[in-house]
Every structure is written in C-alpha cells, then in structure tokens.
Amino acid sequence: MKIRRELKIGVFAVITILAAWWGIKWLGGQNVLITSSYYYAYYEDVSGLIPSSRIKLRGVEIGNVQEIELEMDKVRVEMLIEDKYAEMIPSNSVAEIRSAGLMGGTEINIIQGDAKDFIVAESTIKGVVKPDMLGSMTDKAGELLDGLNTTVDSVNSLLGANSETITDLITNLESMSSSVNSIVASAQSSIRGTLANLNTFTATLAQNSSRVESMLANLDQLSEDLAEAQFVDQLKSTLNDLNAIIKTINDGDGTAGMLINDKALYDSLNEAGVNLAALLEDLKANPMRYVHFSLFGQSEEKAKERAAKKAEREERREAKKSEKSEK
C-alpha cells in the first residue's frame, strides 16, 4: 500500500509538471500538440516587438516570436512557425514588422515572394520594418500643422501690410451699399408701377385666354394646311430646278451660259458698247454730219434752204401783224 501511494504521488507530480509545462508553452504562444520549426530574421530595430508576438500570413496566425536578442549591430528574432504553413512561404519572402492595429501592439507579417522553392527549418527570412501607422499619421499631422502655421503667419503679415488698403476697401463698400440703397429707394415707385403693369398684363392674358387658344389653334390649322398643300415639297422642287439652271449656266450650256462663260464674247460686247457710246456722243455733237446718211435722204444744203424759207415765212407773219396793228 505504501508503494502504491508513492506511485500515485509520482504520477500526479509528473502530470502536474507536464500540465504546467504545457500551460507555460501555451501562454508563450506555442502549441506543443502541433509540430513547428524555428526560423530567423534580422532587423535594425524591433521596437514594440516582444516574445509571443504573433506571426501572420495573409491575416492568419501561423506562429509566434520565441526569442529576441542582439547580435552585433543587428537584432535577431527567433520565430516558431507551424510546419504545415512552411510550404506556403517561398524562400524570398519577407518578414515585416508592423503595427497590430490602432489599439497598439506589434506583429510580424509574412509577405510571400515569387520563388519556386520554399523556406526550410532553421533558415533565415529577410526582415523589414513597416513605418508605424500612428507614427506616420503623427508626423504628417505635425507637418500639416507647420504648414498651417506658416500660412497663418503669411496671412497675418499680408493683412498687416495692407491694412490701410483693406480699410479703404471696406469704406468704399459701405458707400457703395449706401448708393445702392438710395437708388433702390428712388426707383421703388417705378418698380411698383412695373409690377402693377405686369400684373395687369397677366390679368389681361388670363381674360383673353380663349382668344390666345383660338390663335394657337389657327396657327396649328395653318401649319396643317401648308403640310397638306405639299408646300415644302414644292419649295424643294423649285430649289432643285434653280440648282439645275445654275449648273447649266456654270457648265456653259445655253445662251446665258455662253454669255457668262465665253470671255471672247464678253470682250466683243464690251468693245461694241464702247464704240456705240462714242458714236452717240459724236452724233450729239455733230448731228448734221450724219443726216446725209439718215433714212430721210436730206443733205446739208436742203436743210439750209428749208431754214431760209422758214425765216421768210416768219418775216411775212410779222409784217402782217404790224399792218393789222396800224389799222
């Protein structure tokens, strides 16, 4: 019985030690029931990263950080990654330290490469550090505030340098607003009259709405009559005929086309017109020169005789008038 009791105590102690060991491993982020392998990465700085920090691949947790220690001018990080995920990590993948979120914390994110071979146990993965999101936002906010301060200072200096101009501008605006108010006040009666006339006009339209509708109906009827009379088709036909006539003239066909397009004929007619004008001018200046060739067949001598006889008859008439007046 004494041996059995000691055996029970020993077995219980072993079980307790194993449970404690498993609990410690589990709290450290290591599951002893899953086979895993160690990998390493080197960084310049691992601020925020601690043992048991998560290691993720595409957002899925695949392991934990086991140990962090300095080696010369680098920081060596020991990572424990489950073996079933090793075939998903190409050999040129990158272990990036990044912020775990707005609530704080740091984790390692595995960025897959494009190599054909995969990592093996105890191998080294290239380590990089991603800028902290909150830190970068703080830096950008600081830069933004610096820029705003510079802008405010520039605006203040500009306002100080142009204070007199701004005062004059405000004074001019006040005087302008006063002028506008006086103009509106003086034209208020005219505006009221215009509005009254407009109201009268709209009332007249309302009273004669039937006439307006009748006029619109007549216009519709007129348009329908024009459409029925094929006015548009006749107009198109007339335009086509006119285009044909113009084309004939341009081509030089017909009398009009020959007159327009034959330059020699135009020159001959122009020369004949000039000669005719010269002939008419000479006929006005020397009509007796052309009487001999006229249709009346009179010469210059006969014309003189006729003029002499006419003068004798005039003298006789004058003589008879004088005789009658003496009696």
Image (cartoon, rainbow, N blue to C red):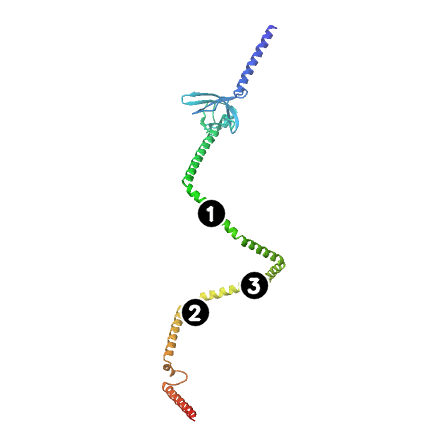
The amino acid at mark 1 is Ser
Q: In this view, does 14 lie above or below 192?
A: above
Nearer the camera: disc 3 or disc 1: 1
Characterize the local packing of mark 3: few (<14), some (14-19) or many (20 or more) Cα atoms within 10 angstroms.
few
* Secondary structure category for the residue under label 2: helix
Residue at the far bottom in the pictured view: 327
CA separation, marks 3 and 1?
A: 64 Å
| Residue 202 position in % (x across, y down) | 59, 56
Comes first in the chain, label 3 or label 1? 1
CA separation, marks 2 and 3?
A: 34 Å
| Residue 257 position in % (x across, y down) | 45, 68
* Secondary structure category for the residue under label 3: helix
CA separation, marks 1 and 2?
A: 75 Å
Work out whether residue 114 or residue 293 is closer to the camera in this orientation and state it: 293
Query: Which label sits on residue 175?
Result: 1
Apparent side of residue 306 relative to residue 51 in the rendered image (left or right): left
Q: In this view, does 145 lie above or below 3?
A: below
Q: Mark 2 points at which residue?
A: 259
The amino acid at mark 3 is Phe
Work out whether residue 203 or residue 261 is closer to the camera in this orientation and state it: 203
Placement of the C terminus among the 4 image quadrants: bottom left
Placement of the N terminus among the 4 image quadrants: top right
Characterize the local packing of mark 1: few (<14), some (14-19) or many (20 or more) Cα atoms within 10 angstroms.
few
The amino acid at mark 2 is Leu
- Identify which residue is drawn at 48% across, 29% down: 134
Q: Name the residue under label 3.
A: 231
Comes first in the chain, label 1 or label 2? 1
